[in-house]
Image (tube, rainbow, N blue to C red):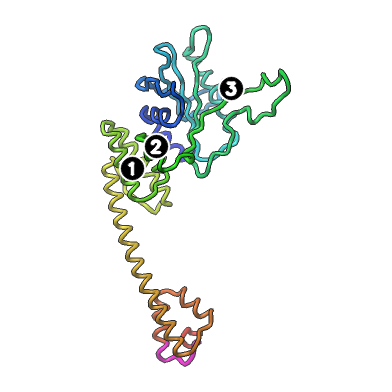
């Protein structure tokens, strides 16, 4: 798992995030009607029969149909497209069932609880892999088709949702998606405020979000935004506001410097033209690409130079 996937796993270690993922992004009326106060985290580490260990991303369970049955939610995080994702999800569901059988967490009559496999994709570009293992296997004729495996997973691809749609949702997962692709600096600050309001009584999750947002902003800026470590969303917003003001002032200064430099280049070009006539294209291009030090040196030489070559030191 990459660092980006690991940071998502940290966020989804809270029941609030799992609830908002299901309620906001899995279009099913029955699922939305479940009591998500009964959410429980389940061990996601399985040991297969040949003793090879693997750790799945996130497994939760929620009570369904009253008190007698759990629905298991198996959530896998992807920042890249995997064409073999259906095979992986089939394997993960099988390993989960093996683990439930070993622990005795099965239904009466040797039946298994339902498992909903979910892939949360937050990479660049749309998801292009199949969502059902049956799509990877050629169809067989007649009765033989019945014996081929089928397993479909729910795909939550954050690239499918527009910024306007996500902004209409008061939902933690929607806020995560928006923070991955903020439209402006103002949008970032508003998202920090929004998450803070939604988690007003959840101090631990507020700290987790602050850590995650800090990492996302650094990664998305190519580590140009080297913020100090923060412990809370309020502190994060304060540091962000300070950095945005610094950047705005820096951009103004750079703009003024570029304006002065362009003016000096144009003045030098006019003076050279009056002294030596129309300038060759190569000379014009050299002046346009020059820095402040070269422009100053050429302007000084122009006073005594008898030719263009003397001005440019050739």
Q: Is residue 266 left or right of residue 193?
A: right
As drawn, 296 above or below 161: below
* Front disc: 3 or 2: 2
Dot 1 or dot 2, earlier in sequence? 2
Circle 3: element type: loop
Q: How many marks?
A: 3
What whole-number distance in Å separates the C-alpha atoms at marks 1 and 3? 47 Å
Mark 3 closeness class: few <14, some 14–19, many ≥20 residues within 10 Å = few
* Front disc: 1 or 3: 1
Pointers 1 and 2 in contact (C-beta within 8 Å): no
- On the image, the x and y values in percent for residue 39 come to 38, 22
Which residue is found at the position 30% from the left and 34% from the top? 198
| Residue at the spot of label 1 | 191
- On the image, the x and y values in percent for residue 103 come to 47, 14
Magenta stretch holds residue 234: no
As drawn, 59 above or below 165: above
The label number, if any, that marks residue 50 in the structure image:
3
Q: Which residues are magenta?
A: 302-308
Q: Is residue 246 left or right of residue 125?
A: left
What whole-number distance in Å separates the C-alpha atoms at marks 1 and 2? 10 Å
Secondary structure that dominates the magenta span: loop
Pointers 3 and 2 in contact (C-beta within 8 Å): no
Q: Is residue 146 left or right of residue 195?
A: right
The label number, if any, that marks residue 174 in the structure image:
2
């Amino acid at each position: 798992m990459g660092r980006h996937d690991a940071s998502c796993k940290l966020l989804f270690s809270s029941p609030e995030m799992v609830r908002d993922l299901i309620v906001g992004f899995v279009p099913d009326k029955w699922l939305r009607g479940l009591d998500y106060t009964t959410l429980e985290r389940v061990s996601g580490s399985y040991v297969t029969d040949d003793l090879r260990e693997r750790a799945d991303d996130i497994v939760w369970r929620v009570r369904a149909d009253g008190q007698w049955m759990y629905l298991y939610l198996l959530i896998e995080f992807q920042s890249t497209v995997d064409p073999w994702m259906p095979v992986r999800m089939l394997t993960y569901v099988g390993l989960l069932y093996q683990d439930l059988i070993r622990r005795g967490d099965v239904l009466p009559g040797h039946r298994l609880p339902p498992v909903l496999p979910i892939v949360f994709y937050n990479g660049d570009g749309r998801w292009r892999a199949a969502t059902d293992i049956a799509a990877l296997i050629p169809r067989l004729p007649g009765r033989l088709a019945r014996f081929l495996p089928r397993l479909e997973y729910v795909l939550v691809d954050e690239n499918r949702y527009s910024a306007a749609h996500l902004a209409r949702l008061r939902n933690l997962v929607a806020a995560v998606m928006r923070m991955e692709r903020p439209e402006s600096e103002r949008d970032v600050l508003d998202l920090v405020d929004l998450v803070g309001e939604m988690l007003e009584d959840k101090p631990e999750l507020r700290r987790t979000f602050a850590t995650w947002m800090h990492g996302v902003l650094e990664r998305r800026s190519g580590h140009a935004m080297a913020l100090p470590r923060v412990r809370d969303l309020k502190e994060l917003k304060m540091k962000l506001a300070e950095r945005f003001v610094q950047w705005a002032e820096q951009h103004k200064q750079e703009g003024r410097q570029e304006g002065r430099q362009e003016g000096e280049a144009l003045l030098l070009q006019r003076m050279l033209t009056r002294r030596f006539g129309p300038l060759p294209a190569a000379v014009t291009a050299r002046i346009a690409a020059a820095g402040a030090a070269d422009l100053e040196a050429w302007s000084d030489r122009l006073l005594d130079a008898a030719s263009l070559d003397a001005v440019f030191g050739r």
